[in-house]
Amino acid sequence: MSLLAALASIYAYGSVSDCSKGTALFTITSMSLTPDPPVTGQNSTLDLSMLVPKDVVSGTATYSVTYNFIPLAPTVEDLCANVACPIQTGTLKTTSSIPIDSSLKGSITFRIEWKDASNTELMCVSVNVKV
């Protein structure tokens, strides 16, 4: 590893985790964030693969951001605006783009939470980035 690469790894860090605490209906089978480590000023790509045990026809997607431990106002959208509905039983693969603004310094946490129409948690993913 070059000195430049070693220094870059000190200043950029990214991780993806399941934040559902085992209560979500969907089972996340794989998750990745690329590039790893994230590059400021570029978008990172979040790939998820999930097992869906039953069809879901509607719900909400909540996107939350915490910047240097300060929570920003979450955005709540129709789940079907982000993923084709109905979500059918089987394997669901999604790809999302996460912007990493070059003017930000410190810790950024992106949280994505899906719920169905009866408010049952479908999945929760947390992406932690340090730049």
Image (cartoon, rainbow, N blue to C red):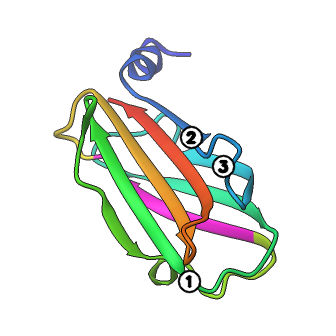
- According to the picture, the residue beneath numbered tag 2 turns out to be 16
Q: Dot 1, how many residues are within 10 Å of its Cα: few (below 14), some (14-19), or many (20+)?
A: some
Q: Dot 3, how many residues are within 10 Å of its Cα: few (below 14), some (14-19), or many (20+)?
A: some
In this picture, residue 45 sits left or right of residue 56? left
- According to the picture, the residue beneath numbered tag 3 turns out to be 31
Q: Predominant secondary structure in magenta?
A: strand
The answer for how far apart the CA atoms under marks 3 and 1 are is 23 Å
For marks 2 and 1, the one nearer the N-term is 2
- Judge whether 34 appears above or below 89 on screen: above
Residue 3 screen position, x and y as percent: 44, 11
- Tell which of 125 and 119 is nearer to you: 119
- Dot 3 lies on which element? strand
- Tell which of 124 and 119 is nearer to you: 119
Q: Are marks 2 and 3 in contact (CB under 8 Å)?
A: yes
Q: Is residue 50 magenta?
A: no
Outermost residue, top side: 3
| Residue type indicated by callout 2 | Val
Can residue 99 be seen here?
A: no
Residue 77 screen position, x and y as percent: 38, 74
- Dot 2 lies on which element? strand
Residue 64 screen position, x and y as percent: 35, 52
In this picture, residue 114 sits left or right of residue 99? right
Q: Which mark is residue 58?
A: 1
Quadrant of residue 8 in the image?
Answer: top left
Q: Are marks 3 and 1 in contact (CB under 8 Å)?
A: no
Q: Which mark is residue 99?
A: none
Give the magenta part as a residue range: 92-100
Can residue 19 be seen here?
A: yes
For marks 3 and 1, the one nearer the N-term is 3
Residue 51 screen position, x and y as percent: 79, 63
